[in-house]
Amino acid sequence: MSVAFRRESDDEHLEPKFELPIPPGPNLVTERGLALIGARVEALEAVLAGLSEETEIKRVKRDLRYWRTRQATAQLMPVPEGDAVAFGSTVTFRMGGKERTVTLVGDDEADPAAGLLSFTAPLSRALMGAEVGDEIDFGGKAGAIVVLAVNG
C-alpha cells in the first residue's frame, strides 16, 4: 500500500524524548549539593501532583527520574582538611594575570559563573592536590596557574 494512503499518528512526527544523561563517574556531592538535589526532588514532586496534561506529566516524570537517581547515588564527601586542593576546597589562584576563586563541587551543583566548578572540569582536575605556592601546567603552558590560597 502506498505511504500516501496510510494513516500516521501525530506521535510519529514528534522528536523522541530521551532520558536526561547522567554524568559519568561517581556522584560526589557537598552538603549543599545534597540539599539542592533533595530540594529539586521535592519541588518536582509538588509540581507533578498538580499536573493534568500528559505531555507535562511525562516531562516532569523524566526530570524526577534523573534527580531521584542523583539523590540515590550521591556520595557525601567530607569537608576537606589540610593544605592540598581536594573536592569541596575553595581555591584562589592566578591564571593569565587574573586572580580568581573557585570552589570544587559536584556536577549538579556546578555553576561556573558563581565560582562553583565541577570537580570533573579540566581546571579542577589540574588544581587537585596542589598547595599554596604551586605552579601548575595548564592549557599547554608551563606554570600557567599559581595557587594563592586553599580553604576547606
Image (cartoon, grey):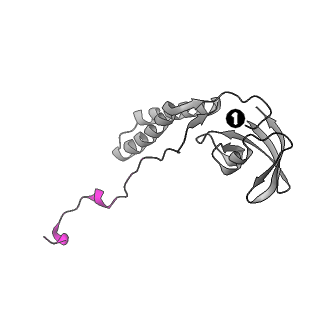
Indicate whether 17 appears above or below 67.
below
Q: Residue sitting at 42 percent across and 47 percent down?
A: 19
User: In the image, 61: left or right of 113?
Assistant: left
In the rendering, at what x and y percent does residue 83 appear?
80, 33
Indicate whether 88 appears above or below 24.
above
Q: Residue sitting at 56 percent across and 37 percent down?
A: 27
**Looking at the image, which is closer to me, 94 or 131?**
131
Q: Residue sitting at 37 percent across and 44 percent down?
A: 58
In the rendering, at what x and y percent does residue 139 appear?
73, 58
Mark 1 is surrounded, within 10 Å at the Cα level, by few (under 14), some (14 to 19) or many (20 or more) other residues, namely many
In the rendering, at what x and y percent does residue 43 appear?
50, 34
Residue type of the residue flagged with mark 1: Gly
Callout 1: helix, strand or loop? Answer: loop
Q: Quadrant of the N terminus?
A: bottom left
Magenta residues (range) = 1-19
In the rendering, at what x and y percent does residue 30 appear?
64, 32
Magenta-highlighted stretch: main secondary structure? loop
Residue 149 magenta-highlighted: no
Q: Residue sitting at 19 percent across and 70 percent down?
A: 3
Label 1: which residue?
A: 88
User: In the image, 142: left or right of 43?
Assistant: right
